[in-house]
Image (cartoon, coloured by chain):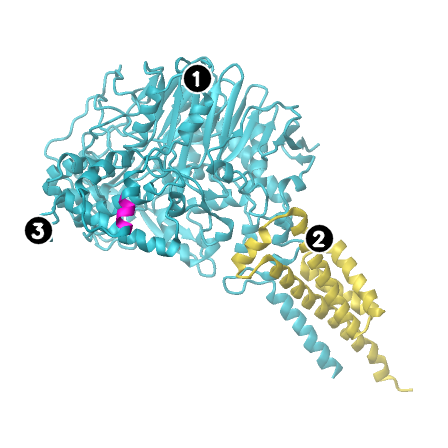
């Protein structure tokens, strides 16, 4: 459940905030959200990863299909990729890595902070 | 362990985030490029999806409405000219920002800033030619003489800059994203520089080559192979024209000596062969409707985004429409409610070279007559991406910059030549176009042209009142015979240009008896013109085809003129092929393929339509024959030019046994026939291997017309193998990389009827549906309706944007 919850949070962040800030801003935000929401390592990784990947894939597919533009295929040729569809996939993979790692970092950091009191508990 | 885990993941996150944001090798930063909210995916949107109803603009005096028609052609309706040009700047930047900036970067010799050291030589060349220097003088000229034009240029620049300032990352053109740089501010200087760049594209000289040829061939043979006037001269200003002015006396100084060195340096890059243009105007007496019709098709390198951007510019006083140059103000080739005009290149050896004798190695003084004159040093700072700034010192004499010297391509220590070029003089080409845009009649047109210096153009003109006119306008040096044909001695003041031909003595004609005016880059005048005229690149075929057709045509319609722009009659083949076929005779023992080729070319109707095989066979056969004939000249280790197709064909026809056909290095004595036979053999073997590799050898397939993106490496943004006919020397001059970059036909009746097309599209964005949408129509010889539009017209409206002043 935590996975789906965090997935939805990530997608909302990307859809509503990413148009106004660059990708590294989203990385910082996902780090903070994972830190605050503490979804757990696994949910942070998979939820953050799929969240960013799906929103990026969704938007790039939407833009391509809605416009009917051949630009993705042309870009693929210039960048040495086999096709525009591959570029959609690459966009997704990169989105996954950025989302997953940022969220996992946040969650791991939270774990550090959370554990500290038990470590120093002397009662 | 927990700490380690966190640190590991955290560092990995930072590393991936960071690596994604920096360029890796030649690749652009990958994450910003792929992020669909900001990266290239945003460029899939076309302009109609991004349309804004209202934009507020600073410094605007009144609201300005811009209506886009279905072809994304903006029609700007402003209350005054300052607003008009401010919005022209904004709108042009909106659609063509990357292109206009890239072209001025090229003109300024700043490509190294974008692509790194690979472009350093190119940038040095651009700067050493003094384009930037010329533009600075141009700006100074405006500051001192023409505040109005300067104010408009600044308004335009402000419009461009307001667009740049509001640009979001998502809307940054895709080329910036791939090449990883961002637009900088525009300025009046850049607009002037762009016009200087046009000069550079259109002007060449063969002084170096002719100097060498003179030494190698001797005067007599040189004049036989390269006569100043061709036998069939069909000049721009009708041959029977009477010159009604008292010429300024000028004669060749006695006992003058041209420097006689044989020079092994490379010549300056020249405009590509095939850059030329057609324009003509027929008077009402020759047209069906009784109205004058004007046509213009400038042939330039075929590029995407297109060189041209179509616009209508309207104020309460006038409405002008046609082709604009992104970066320059107003319409360059177009029409308004009263007149229409078109341009073709009027090259006339506008660049000359003077040998400079420096006093010593410091190069601070050089000989001029009995004195030593001081030089000036101009240090060019060339920023290079990824490397430190390159400083290049260029020596300036009173003639102009010393382009080649010991630091730049001068293989000989003394190869110091200064470039004399009208581009290095203050001038005001922009004003010509501003004035043409608002011209009402022939007088206004003449007054507008008086401001035009370079690159010299043939301005065709037609007016609603029934006039047709042509004027060859530029700032032409008044030269004595052969002055500037060869390299000259800069130490001899008699070699220097003394004065210029006054504007009113430039060749011009108004309403000639024959009922039409025309130009196709041929000789401007017949020999009766009192001044020396020379250029190596004059056209010999398009002009005669055009004039022959115009002479015989009557009851001309707009459709006829469109067809004439698309005419692909191969006049060179019509003249050369019978000569070649007769010299070839009836060869025996031909292979099956060879007989087939010969049969096909003999049965060909001489039109270079895309599906024809004849033009391919002729073209190859001619080229091989031509290379055979002039192989002695090609094998020299110095730069020369070879005689043109016209003169070569004439010699083959009239003197096939002449010694000019003999190759000096062979024991046998060759005549024209031998070269034709050898050429035929070579053609057969070349064409056979071509067929084996590529298949169908019909003309369009063989010629492979390509409309190339300004960054040639971006082949995906180019349109390749366009199925279309025509070629060099034909009215439809579409060759591999050159052709009609803009076609326009205007009928000046009670209601102006206008049609235009260019090989590209209004959008500069390769992802837009408006990027290359005109190409199929252009390739078929079709046109778009270019009629003037009213402010409140509803039909064929795509969207409207209103620019409102900031309160």
Whole-percent x, y for residue B569 in the image: 34, 33
Whole-percent x, y for residue B366 in the image: 22, 44
Q: Main secondary structure of the magenta part?
A: helix
Image point (69%, 66%), residue name: A96
Chain under callout 3? B
At label 2, counting other C-alpha atoms closer than 10 Å, the crowd grade (few under 14, some 14-19, many 20 or more) is some
Extreme-bottom residue of the structure: A123
Image point (10%, 42%), residue name: B659
State which chain is coloured cyan: B
Closer to the camera: disc 1 or disc 2?
A: 1
Chain under callout 1? B
Q: Is residue B473 visible?
A: no
Query: Does mark 3 fall on the same chain as mark 2?
Result: no
With B112 as the anchor, is B595 left or right in this view? Answer: left
In this figure, which residue is indicated by the disc labeled 3? B668
Q: Colour of chain A?
A: yellow
As rendered, which of B50 and B443 lies closer to the eye? B50
Chain under callout 2? A
Relative vertical location of residue B525 with respect to residue B576 in this rendering, above or below: above
Q: CA distance from mark 1 to mark 2?
A: 55 Å
Q: Secondary structure at mark 3?
A: loop
Instruction: Determine which quarter of the picture holds residue B509.
Output: top left
In this figure, which residue is indicated by the disc labeled 2? A19
As rendered, which of B338 and B317 lies closer to the eye? B338
Q: Which residues are magenta?
A: B593-598
Q: Which mark is residue B292?
A: 1
Residue B597 painted magenta: yes
Quadrant placement of the C terminus of chain B = top right
Whole-percent x, y for residue B260 in the image: 14, 45
Closer to the camera: disc 1 or disc 3?
A: 3
With A5 as the anchor, is B125 left or right in this view? Answer: left
Q: Earlier in the sequence, mark 1 or mark 3?
A: 1
């Amino acid at each position: 459940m935590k996975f789906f919850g965090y997935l939805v949070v990530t997608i909302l962040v990307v859809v509503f905030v990413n148009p106004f800030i660059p990708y590294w801003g989203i990385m910082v935000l996902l780090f903070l959200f994972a830190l605050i929401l503490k979804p757990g390592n696994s949910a942070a990784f998979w939820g953050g990863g799929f969240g960013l990947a799906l929103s990026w894939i969704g938007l790039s597919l939407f833009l391509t299909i809605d416009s009917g533009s051949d630009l993705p295929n042309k870009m693929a040729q210039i960048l040495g990729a086999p096709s525009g569809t591959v570029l959609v996939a690459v966009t997704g993979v990169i989105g996954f890595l950025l989302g997953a790692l940022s969220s996992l970092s946040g969650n791991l950091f939270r774990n550090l902070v959370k554990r500290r009191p038990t470590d120093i508990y002397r009662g | 362990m927990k700490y380690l885990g966190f640190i590991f993941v955290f560092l990995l996150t930072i590393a991936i985030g960071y690596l994604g944001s920096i360029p890796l090798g030649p690749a652009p930063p990958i994450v910003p490029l792929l992020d669909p909210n900001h990266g290239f995916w945003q460029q899939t949107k076309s302009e109609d999806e991004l349309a804004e109803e209202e934009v507020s603009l600073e410094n605007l005096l009144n609201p300005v409405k811009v209506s886009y028609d279905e072809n994304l052609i903006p029609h700007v309706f402003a209350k005054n000219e300052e607003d008009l040009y401010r919005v022209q700047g904004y709108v042009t930047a909106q659609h063509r920002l990357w292109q206009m900036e890239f072209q001025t970067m090229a003109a300024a010799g700043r490509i190294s800033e974008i692509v790194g050291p690979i472009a350093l030589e190119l940038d040095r060349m651009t700067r050493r030619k003094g384009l930037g220097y010329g533009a600075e003088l141009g700006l100074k000229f405006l500051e001192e003489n023409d505040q109005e034009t300067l104010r408009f240029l600044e308004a335009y620049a402000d419009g461009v800059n307001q667009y740049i300032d509001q640009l979001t990352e998502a809307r940054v053109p895709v080329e910036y994203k791939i090449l990883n740089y961002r637009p900088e501010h525009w300025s009046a200087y850049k607009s002037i520089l762009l016009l200087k760049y046009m000069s550079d594209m259109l002007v060449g000289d063969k002084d170096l080559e002719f100097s060498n040829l003179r030494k190698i061939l001797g005067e007599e043979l040189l004049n036989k192979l390269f006569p100043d006037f061709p036998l069939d001269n069909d000049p721009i200003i009708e041959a029977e024209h009477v010159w009604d002015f008292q010429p300024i006396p000028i004669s060749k100084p006695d006992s003058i000596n041209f420097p006689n060195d044989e020079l092994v340096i490379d010549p300056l890059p020249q405009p590509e062969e095939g850059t030329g243009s057609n324009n003509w105007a027929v008077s009402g007496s020759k047209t069906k409707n009784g109205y004058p019709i004007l046509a213009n098709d400038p042939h330039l390198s075929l590029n995407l985004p297109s060189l041209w951007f179509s616009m209508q510019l309207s104020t309460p006083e006038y409405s002008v429409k046609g082709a604009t140059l992104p970066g320059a103000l107003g319409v360059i080739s177009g029409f308004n409610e009263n007149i229409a005009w078109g341009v073709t290149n009027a090259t006339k050896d506008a660049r000359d070279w003077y040998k400079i004798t420096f006093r010593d190695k410091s190069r601070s003084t050089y000989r001029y007559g009995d004195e030593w004159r001081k030089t000036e040093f101009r240090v060019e700072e060339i920023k290079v991406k990824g490397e430190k700034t390159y400083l290049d010192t260029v020596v300036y004499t009173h003639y102009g910059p010393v382009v080649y010297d010991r630091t730049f391509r001068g293989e000989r220590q003394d190869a110091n030549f200064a470039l004399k070029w009208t581009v290095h003089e203050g001038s005001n080409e922009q004003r010509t176009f501003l004035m043409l845009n608002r011209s009402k009649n022939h007088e206004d047109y003449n007054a507008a042209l008086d401001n035009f210096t370079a690159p010299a153009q043939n301005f065709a003109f037609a007016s609603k009142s029934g006039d047709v006119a042509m004027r060859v306008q530029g700032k032409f040096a008044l030269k004595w015979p052969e002055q500037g044909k060869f390299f000259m001695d800069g130490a001899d003041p008699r070699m220097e240009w003394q004065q210029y031909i006054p504007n009113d003595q430039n060749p011009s004609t108004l309403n000639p008896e024959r009922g039409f005016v025309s130009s196709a880059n041929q000789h401007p005048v017949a020999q009766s013109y009192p001044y020396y005229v020379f250029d190596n690149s004059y056209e010999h075929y398009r002009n005669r085809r055009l004039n022959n057709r115009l002479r015989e045509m009557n009851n001309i319609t707009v459709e006829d003129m469109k067809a004439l722009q698309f005419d692909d009659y191969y006049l060179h083949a019509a003249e050369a092929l019978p000569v070649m076929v007769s010299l070839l005779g009836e060869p025996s023992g031909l292979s099956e393929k060879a007989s087939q080729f010969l049969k096909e070319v003999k049965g060909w109707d001489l039109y270079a339509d895309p599906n024809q095989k004849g033009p391919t066979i002729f073209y190859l056969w001619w080229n091989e024959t031509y290379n055979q004939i002039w192989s002695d000249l090609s094998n020299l280790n110095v730069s020369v030019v070879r005689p043109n197709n016209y003169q070569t064909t004439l010699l083959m026809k009239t003197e096939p046994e002449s010694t000019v056909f003999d190759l000096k290095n062979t024991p046998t004595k060759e005549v024209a026939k031998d070269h034709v036979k050898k050429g035929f053999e070579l053609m057969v073997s070349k064409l056979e291997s071509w067929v084996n590799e590529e298949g169908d050898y019909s003309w369009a397939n063989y010629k492979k017309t390509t409309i190339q993106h300004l960054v040639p490496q971006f082949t995906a943004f180019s349109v390749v193998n366009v199925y279309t006919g025509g070629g060099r020397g034909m009215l439809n001059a579409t060759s591999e990389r050159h052709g009609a970059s803009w076609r326009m036909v205007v009928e000046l009746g009670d209601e102006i009827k206008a049609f235009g097309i260019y090989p590209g599209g209004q959008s500069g964005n390769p992802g837009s549906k408006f990027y290359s949408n005109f190409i199929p129509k252009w390739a078929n010889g079709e046109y778009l309706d270019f009629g003037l539009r009213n402010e409140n017209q509803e039909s064929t409206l795509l969207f409207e944007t209103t620019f409102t002043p900031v309160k």
